[in-house]
């Protein structure tokens, strides 16, 4: 067949071009060879110019130690400060208001009893620390905006110390007045004072006189979250006039 084409065309290139016209195998073989070649070439370029330099840089780079952020952990007994509690809930129904709080000594349900003027609490652990109950009490008055129900023991202790200081100052002033009167009466005589040993004062821990009451009422299963409303039905006597009004 090539010889026949060669007789029709002067140049071999023209004969081959005419022979390959309409041959679908040519683009198929071209794509089968071109696509893998371009994929392998691009992969080699990326590996040689990008990936290998990055690996070497990571190996030579020292690990950076980032400083850990120091987060101040607030002790549980210092949570819910009383300064954030408001006191504008005059129509508070303490029977229907209660809170649940997870303390370090376990789960606690708490509500306020107006009759006893104290808090009632339920927990599976009877040995919940008083300082944790104080925290739960502060949360109660903060949530329900009734700061007047909570007695601040620290404030009470400060008032107690100020009162004792005033009383001590008054006593010292009275003793100085007595000494001045005695010295004026016996100013003619010379008194020799004996050396008195000063004893160090003992530092005693003071406790607040007033504080919040906490009464343990049982386990969590004994706590009734929902209260039944008492429906009081008032029976009225029916007379003839009221019976007549019903029909009118």
Image: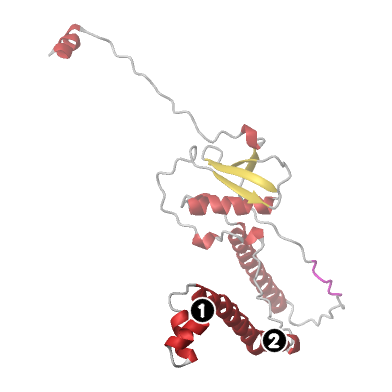
Q: Quadrant of the C terminus?
A: top left
Visible in this render: residue 150? no
Q: Which residue carries the number 1 mark? A: 1
In the rendered image, which quarter is residue 122 located in? top right
Question: What secondary structure is found at the residue carrying circle 1?
Answer: loop
Residue 9 is a magenta residue: no
| Residue lying farthest to the top in this orientation | 240
| Residue lying farthest to the bottom in this orientation | 11
Residue 18 percent location from the top left of the image:
43, 82
Task: Judge from the rendering whether residue 67 lies leftward or rightward of residue 89; answer left or right.
Answer: right
Q: Nearer the viewer, residue 231 or 206?
A: 231
Magenta residue span: 197-202
Q: Residue at x 66, y 52 (%)?
A: 132
Q: Main secondary structure of the magenta part?
A: loop
Q: Nearer the viewer, residue 107 or 3?
A: 3
Residue 20 percent location from the top left of the image:
47, 79
Vertical order, 133 against 68 (above or below)? above
In the rendered image, which quarter is residue 87 located in? bottom left
Q: Residues within 10 Å of mark 1 (few under 14, many from 20)?
A: few
Q: Residues within 10 Å of mark 2 (few under 14, many from 20)?
A: few
Q: Residue at x 87, y 75 (%)?
A: 197
């Amino acid at each position: 067949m090539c010889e026949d084409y060669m007789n029709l065309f002067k140049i071999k290139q023209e004969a081959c071009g005419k022979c390959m016209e309409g041959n679908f195998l040519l683009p198929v073989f071209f794509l089968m060879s071109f696509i893998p070649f371009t994929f392998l070439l691009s992969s080699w370029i990326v590996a040689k110019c990008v990936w290998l330099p990055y690996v070497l840089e990571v190996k030579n780079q020292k690990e950076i130690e980032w400083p850990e952020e120091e987060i101040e952990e607030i002790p549980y007994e210092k949570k819910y400060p009383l300064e954030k509690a408001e006191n504008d809930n005059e129509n508070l129904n303490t029977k229907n208001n209660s809170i649940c709080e997870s303390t370090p000594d376990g789960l606690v349900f708490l509500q306020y009893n107006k009759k006893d003027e104290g808090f009632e609490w339920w927990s599976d652990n009877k040995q919940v620390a008083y300082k944790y109950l104080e925290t739960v009490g502060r949360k109660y008055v903060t949530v329900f905006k009734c700061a007047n129900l909570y007695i601040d023991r620290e404030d009470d202790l400060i008032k107690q110390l100020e009162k004792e200081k005033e009383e001590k100052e008054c006593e010292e002033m009275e003793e100085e007045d007595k000494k001045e009167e005695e010295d004026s009466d016996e100013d003619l005589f010379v008194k020799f004072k004996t050396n008195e040993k000063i004893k160090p004062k003992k530092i005693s821990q003071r406790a607040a006189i007033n504080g919040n009451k906490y009464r343990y009422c049982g386990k969590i299963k004994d706590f009734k979250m929902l209260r039944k409303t008492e429906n009081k039905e008032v029976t009225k006597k029916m007379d003839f006039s009221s019976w007549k009004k019903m029909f009118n």
